[in-house]
Amino acid sequence: MLYAREVPAYGGDTMVANQYLAYETLSAGMQRMLDGLTGIYSAGADRTGREENKNMKMRDTDKTEQYVAEHPVVRTHPETGRKALYVNTEHTIRFKGMTAEESLPLIEFLQIHCTRPEFTARIRWEKGTVGIWDNRCVQHFAINDYHGQRRVMWRLPVGAELPA
């Protein structure tokens, strides 16, 4: 959940992408391959090369590169039972049993697929707007197009759990 405390005069929107649809629109062969794959993730990875990511920072995240975790690339939502992709270029380092170099082309393909326009919605923030989404089945991305202005959001994560 995000609460907009201060928003720029323009820009600073957030994109959310439906990962149920991203998984469901893959070919049956790709789904079978991904269903057994485990990803290696790091909060400090960010291999996107985007300059704006270097300036966007949450509090208390100085040591994020120390945190590495393994999770399934395809996760099953514990309440809906639907499968969703759980991979992105910012935090997925590689796939278990593969090198980073071997993993990168598939990670990049999946990121492009996961964020296709037909899977996305855009949140246009105003002061006081509350945005709520389920991180178990979406990707979200803040658009950093408000240079010289401030965007202050309060973040409340609800019900953290390990992906399954």
Image (spheres, rainbow, N blue to C red):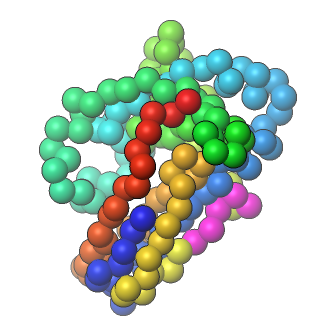
Q: Nearer the viewer, residue 99 or 57?
A: 57
User: Residue 16, relative to residue 124: is it above or below?
Assistant: above
- Horizontal and vertical percent position of residue 34: 67, 25
**Quadrant location of the N terminus?**
bottom left
- Horizontal and vertical percent position of residue 153: 31, 71
Q: Is residue 146 visible?
A: no
- Horizontal and vertical percent position of residue 106: 61, 29
Majority secondary structure in the magenta region:
strand
Residue for point 29% across, 81% down? 5
Q: Nearer the viewer, residue 9 or 162?
A: 162
Residue for point 60% across, 20% down? 37
Q: Is residue 103 left or right of residue 66?
A: right
Q: Quadrant of residue 78?
A: top right
Q: Residue furthest top?
A: 97
Q: Nearer the viewer, residue 25 or 146?
A: 25
- Horizontal and vertical percent position of residue 146: 35, 77
Residue for point 78% across, 42% down? 24
Segment tinted magenta in the rendering: 118-122
Q: Is residue 4 left or right of residue 14?
A: left
Q: Is residue 25 located in the magenta-colored stretch of the structure?
A: no
Residue for point 57% across, 72% down? 122
Q: Is residue 33 visible?
A: yes
